[in-house]
Image (cartoon, rainbow, N blue to C red):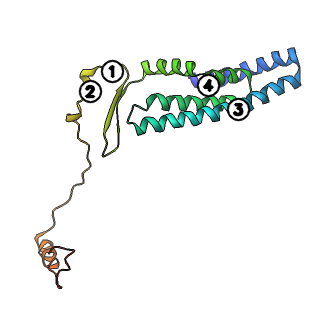
Amino acid sequence: MWLLLAFITIPMIEIALFISVGGAIGLLPTMAIVLLTAILGTHLVRSQGLAAIGKVQKSFNELNDPTEPIAHGAMILIAGVLLLTPGFFTDAVGFALLTPAFRKLMFEFARKRVRVQSFTMGSTHSASFHTGPANQSDRPSRSDVIDGEFSEVDPAPQSQVDKLDSAKKPTHTPSGWTKH
């Protein structure tokens, strides 16, 4: 329901702002502002996006919690979409999302409402991260968790086992690379 409301409200706000600004400064300056914000926004999104990718890679390399750098990268991506959308309201929100302090505020707001139980990386280097306001008592400890896959195999009939045993016998001398 809130998404429908946003799809109706945001274009209405943009139309009202275009009419107001266009009436105050004229058509060409209004179009120039929209074009300039798109160009400036693209440049800022590109530079901040590359920095965000670097921070995500650094957090993975150092086995740190990547939640915040990933969230900042997602907000920069959303800012890029908003800045490329023509309009003053979407540009204002997009530029706000390019401000690190505003992104930090949005991240803390979301962190209080989202609970991530655990995050595990790698098979040889294992690191576990717990974030959010979760209660410590409802989490399993690392020693209680076993990851694995299994498949059930039907036992072969004895006649097939006998055939397999006879097939395993070598008909040649061992090469030294195999054991028979």
**Where does label 3 land, which residue?**
84
Real-space Cα distance between discs 2 and 3? 43 Å
Residue 133 coordinates in the image, percent (x, y): 36, 19
**Disc 1/disc 2 C-alpha distance (Å):** 8 Å
Q: Amino acid at mark 3?
A: Leu
Examine the rendered structure and indicate whether residue 137 appears above or below residue 172.
above
Residue to which mark 4 is pinned: 98
User: Gap between marks 1 and 4, in whole Å?
Assistant: 29 Å
Secondary structure state at the residue bearing disc 3:
helix
Q: Provide the residue designation for mark 1.
A: 134
Q: Quadrant of the C terminus?
A: bottom left
Answer with the quarter of the image where residue 33 lies: top right
Q: Which disc, if any, is residue 139?
A: 2
Q: Determine the residue positioned at 20% across, 74% down.
A: 178
Mark 2 or 4, closer to the camera: 4
Quadrant position of the N terminus in the picture: top right
Amino acid at pointer 1: Ala
Q: Earlier in the sequence, mark 2 or mark 4?
A: 4
Label 1 vs 4, first from the N-terminus: 4
Q: Which marked residue is nearer to the observer: mark 4 or mark 3? A: 4
Is residue 4 toward the left or the right of residue 35 in the image? left
Q: Position of residue 22 (x, y in %)?
A: 85, 19
In the drawing, what numbered circle is on residue 165? none
Taking the spot 78% from the left edge, 27% from the top edge, the residue there is 34
Which amino acid, by three-letter code, is at mark 4?
Leu
Q: Amino acid at mark 2?
A: Arg
Q: CA distance from mark 2 to mark 4?
A: 35 Å
